[in-house]
Image (cartoon, rainbow, N blue to C red):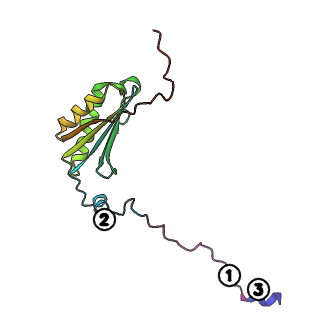
Amino acid sequence: MADEILENQEPLATEPPATEPPATEPLSADPEIRRAKGRGRHIPSGIAHIHATFNNTKVTISDMHGNVVAWGTGGRMGYKGSRKSTSYVAQQMGTDVAKRAMTLGMREVEVRMKGPGSGRESAVRGIAAAGLDISVLKDVTPLPHNGCRPPKRRRV
């Protein structure tokens, strides 16, 4: 009986069978967005999110559905430490990110600013200087309804 089982077995393959990698599904089911992510990318309008903290400024430009088109930070521009938080770097970054978005056909943005940092207005100036039309300026800084206790006051 044991001999019959051994005779019926096939020899082991030396290489594992080739499997295709799983096909990645696009994040959105909307065919317009799927087309935009492909080779013929043309996005006429979008949203510029500016997040200005005390240590850095981040600029992200997305399409109207929230898919990121271009982004930039102080560190990506090549600055380190306290220089990332300057308004000059924020203006440079706004211009750079806006130009990258304009290569995809973007002409108009809605600007949403968040945070207390010094780079808020400078980043908006940089976006406008690059040639993007700003349709709406909106401050979306989250305000606590007396939530967390703020940090203690500095004694310098």
Secondary structure state at the residue bearing disc 1: loop
Quadrant in the picture for the C terminus: top left
Question: To which residue does mark 3 refer?
Answer: 6
Q: Nearer the viewer, mark 3 or mark 2?
A: 2
Secondary structure state at the residue bearing disc 2: helix
Q: Quadrant location of residue 85?
A: top left
Give the CA distance from mark 1 to mark 2.
48 Å
Q: Is residue 15 magenta?
A: yes
Q: Quadrant location of residue 61?
A: top left
| Residue visible at 47% across and 13% down in the picture | 154
On the image, the x and y values in percent for residue 139 come to 30, 34
- Above or below residue 62? Residue 30 is below
Chain part drawn in magenta:
8-23
Mark 3 or mark 1: which comes first in sequence? 3
Horizontal relation, residue 66 to residue 144: left or right: left
| Residue visible at 16% across and 40% down in the picture | 131
Horizontal relation, residue 114 to residue 123: left or right: right
Horizontal relation, residue 84 to residue 32: left or right: right
Identify which amino acid the numbered label 1 is placed on: Pro
Q: Is residue 155 magenta?
A: no
Q: Residue 31 carries which label?
A: 2
